[in-house]
Amino acid sequence: MKSVAAAARSLRKRPFRVSIEGNIGSGKSTCIKFFDKFDNVETHAEPLHEWRDVSGHNLLGLMYSDMHKWTFAFQHYVHLSRLKIQISPPAHPGITVKMFER
């Protein structure tokens, strides 16, 4: 079992997380792209490519075509894909900030 001090040290090593929220077309992607130039910042845009190819199916398109039928499946998949990004380790040890779109 980890000591309290060891647990505190491991928490300090994790990057600070920033989530960029906003309506469609409000500039979230533009904001994320601005921070790409900083070496200590790892940016993650919305993974639209994943949502458009789930075992060969466009889950995003299905959700828009029949919201009543597909919204739950789409939202569930979106949450899982974002969780995967959130818990992934930083690309390199110098990353102190991870930024996420939406």
Image: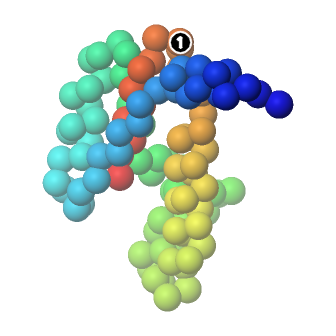
Q: Residues within 10 Å of mark 1 (few under 14, many from 20)?
A: few
User: Which residue is rendered at x = 48% and y = 65% of the image?
Assistant: 60
Along the horizontal axis of the image, is 1 left or right of 54?
A: right
In this view, the residue farthest toward the bottom is: 68
Residue placed furthest toward the right: 1
At a point 22% along the width and 61% down the height, the residue shown is 23
| Residue at the image position 64 percent from the left and 22 percent from the top | 5
Between residue 7 and residue 40, name the one nearer to us.
Answer: 7
Viewer can see residue 45: no
Q: Is residue 69 visible?
A: yes
For the residue pair 6 and 94, the one nearer the viewer reads as 6
Disc 1 marks a residue whose amino acid type is Pro
Image vertical order of residue 22 relative to residue 84, above or below? below
Q: Is residue 95 above or below residue 80?
A: above
Residue shown at the point (36%, 22%) measured from the top left: 41
Indicate the quadrant where residue 34 lies: top left
Between 74 and 1, the one lying in front of the other is 1
The residue closer to the viewer here, 15 or 34, is: 15
Q: Quadrant of the N terminus?
A: top right
Instruction: Place residue 22 in its image quadrant.
Output: bottom left
Task: Give the x, y percent position of residue 91.
Answer: 53, 20
Give the labeled residue for mark 1.
93
Q: Quadrant of residue 58?
A: bottom right
Find numbered disc 1 in the image and state the secondary structure of the residue it sits on. Answer: loop
Q: Position of residue 50 (x, y in %)?
A: 54, 50
